[in-house]
Amino acid sequence: MNAEQAYIAYKPLLYTIAYRMLGSRSDAEEIVQDVLTDYSLQKDGEDIRNEKAYLSRMLTNRCLNIVQSARVRREVYVGNWLPEPEVSFDSVSEDPAEQFERREELSYALLVMLERLTPVERAVFVLRESLEYDYEEIAAILQKTAANCRKILSRAKEKLQEKRNVLPLNDRRVEPLAAAFLEAVQSGRLEGLTQLLTEDALLVSDGGGKVRAAIRPIRGRRRVSAFLQGVIPKGFLGDGCQTAWINGQLGFVVTENGRIQKTITFQLDERGEQLERIFVMLNPDKLPGQASF
């Protein structure tokens, strides 16, 4: 396989690894481009038998370095740091294959939770649980033993499940709750909104110091409701609000003058009956530009 064929064959996989490792679309795109460019230069002088393993190793090692430095940068980040959302405006499909594909995407809530892990734990989790690499492949990529990788994955799962019995997955049960949330904030009838939230609901917003956002997470049903009551009259919904797929789960995109102003994403409680977390991305550096419905 020549360099151009490798680019076409492996770019989607490499981007998926990079995005799930870094939580940044722009960083993922840049690092994939760099890896594939370097690979095309190296290939002429090397006999590479397993291109997928070789490229995965190159990419993962570079991601590990970036994650380490990113943690230092985030210590001075203004307010809450959230991953960049991936937004799609595709219509809701009843095709079981398409529905399955969306559920297989890492939910935004899980992407947020991955920040609890060390870089190596995150790499093992992404490669094994998200992309189904076998332990021998992961061991070769990370230069560890398969047994060690199993232990790392077990430790990562313990951290992620520390406060939950199940990991937050993409779930179609969020759709009626999301619709009820939108109806409540659009109509201004927020009495019903309170009932949609768990008692310990949490709202996290990321403005990155570029736009106004809550500096700290807002905790508790009453405080979240009070916060929304305060910001809705001040243009919280911009001049338009559109449903969208955000990391494979239904959420909302708020626009202003045709540009995306914020995304709103949800995490369900363990029973799938109420909203436990609301994630609001406002940082313009992390949002797609022009809205395309």
Image (cartoon, helix red, strand yellow):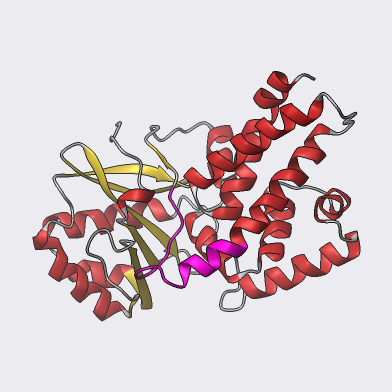
Verify whether residue 117 appears in magenta: no
Q: Residue 72 or 293: which is nearer the viewer? A: 72
Look at the image and tell me in which quarter the N terminus lies.
Answer: top right
Percent coordinates x, y for residue 126 in the rendering: 67, 54
- Residue at position x 73%, y 22% from top? 3
Stretch in magenta = 68-85
Asked if 11 appears above or below 121 in the picture, the reply is: above
Instruction: Name the residue furthest left.
Output: 233
- Residue 120's quadrant in the figure? bottom right
User: In the shown orientation, is residue 130 left or right of residue 226?
Assistant: right
Q: Residue 237 or 46: which is nearer the viewer? A: 46
- Residue at position x 60%, y 56% from top? 66
Asked if 277 appears above or below 254 in the picture, the reply is: below
Q: Main secondary structure of the magenta part?
A: loop
Residue 264 in view:
yes
User: In the shown orientation, is residue 9 left or right of residue 134?
Assistant: left
- Residue at position x 83%, y 64% from top? 150
- Residue at position x 38%, y 69% from top? 80
User: In the shown orientation, is residue 193 left or right of residue 94?
Assistant: left
Look at the image and tell me in which quarter the C terminus lies.
Answer: top left
Q: Residue 68 or 158: which is nearer the viewer? A: 68
Percent coordinates x, y for residue 24 in the rendering: 49, 50
- Residue 153's quadrant in the figure? bottom right
Residue 271 in view:
no
Percent coordinates x, y for residue 269 in the rendering: 46, 69
